[in-house]
């Protein structure tokens, strides 16, 4: 499972949603699930409602993987999912939308990848799946 925070108005939106969808299309039949968590904490780049975000992603990028409810990934309002992910890796704050990916293996081991673009993480992601 790959988990990342996303935003519709980020400078990296197009390239990252395309890379995530390509990865999902290539690996879903092998069991890959992608959970994308919209986040408005970085430059207010995700102002829409859950339905608006989903419609935008499906129409613009053909996204088929699940888009979750909008969450906070840092600070006092950090979602339970992100608290757990950070507690099981480094507790460092998430730096930006799309910047951090978490891979959760079938046995529950969590690996954190902090290297920005999904495409630049592809080899490492693939090795962990």
Image (cartoon, rainbow, N blue to C red):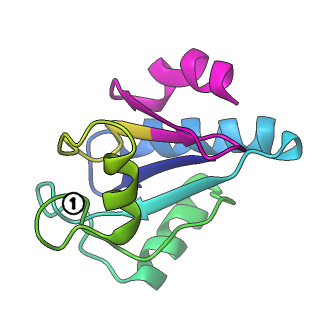
Residue at 45%, 35% in the rendered image:
15
Q: Residue at x 49, y 71 (%)?
A: 68
Residue 28 visible from this viewpoint: yes
Q: Would residue 110 be found to the left or right of residue 74 on screen?
A: right
> Which element is circle 1 on?
loop
Give the side of residue 88 with respect to residue 59, left or right.
left
Q: Position of residue 80 (x, y in %)?
A: 36, 70
Magenta highlight on residue 103: yes
Q: Nearer the viewer, residue 10 or 34?
A: 34
Which residue reaches farthest right?
29
Q: Left or right: 108 with respect to 13?
A: right
Residue 38: percent from left, percent from top: 37, 64
Answer above or below: position of 105 versus 41.
above
**Which stretch is magenta?**
102-129
Question: Looking at the image, can residue 8 be seen?
Answer: no
| Residue ID at (86%, 40%) | 30
- Crowding at dot 1, Cα within 10 Å, few <14 / some 14-19 / many 20+, comes out as some
Q: Position of residue 13 (x, y in %)?
A: 38, 46
- Please state, as top left, top right, bottom left or bottom right, where the C terminus lies in the image: top right
- The number of numbered discs placed on residues in the rendered structure image is 1
* Residue 11 drawn above or below residue 120: below
**Where is residue 50 drawn, in percent x and y?**
43, 81
Q: Residue at x 15, y 54 (%)?
A: 42
> Compared with residue 21, is residue 56 higher up or lower down, i.e. above or below?
below
Residue position marked by numbered label 1 in the rendering? 45
Is 11 or 50 nearer to us in this picture?
Answer: 50
In magenta segment, residue 126: yes
């Amino acid at each position: 499972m790959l988990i990342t925070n996303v935003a519709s108005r980020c400078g990296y939106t197009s390239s990252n949603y395309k890379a995530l969808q390509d990865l999902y299309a290539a690996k879903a039949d092998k069991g890959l699930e992608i959970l994308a968590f919209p986040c408005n904490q970085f430059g207010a780049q995700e102002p829409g409602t859950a339905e608006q975000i989903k419609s935008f992603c499906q129409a613009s990028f053909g996204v088929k993987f699940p888009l979750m409810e909008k969450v906070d990934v840092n600070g006092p309002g950090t979602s339970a999912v992100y608290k757990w992910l950070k507690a099981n890796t480094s507790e460092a704050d998430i730096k930006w939308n799309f910047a951090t990916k978490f891979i959760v293996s079938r046995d529950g081991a969590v690996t954190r990848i902090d290297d920005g673009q999904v495409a630049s993480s592809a080899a490492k992601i693939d090795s962990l799946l």
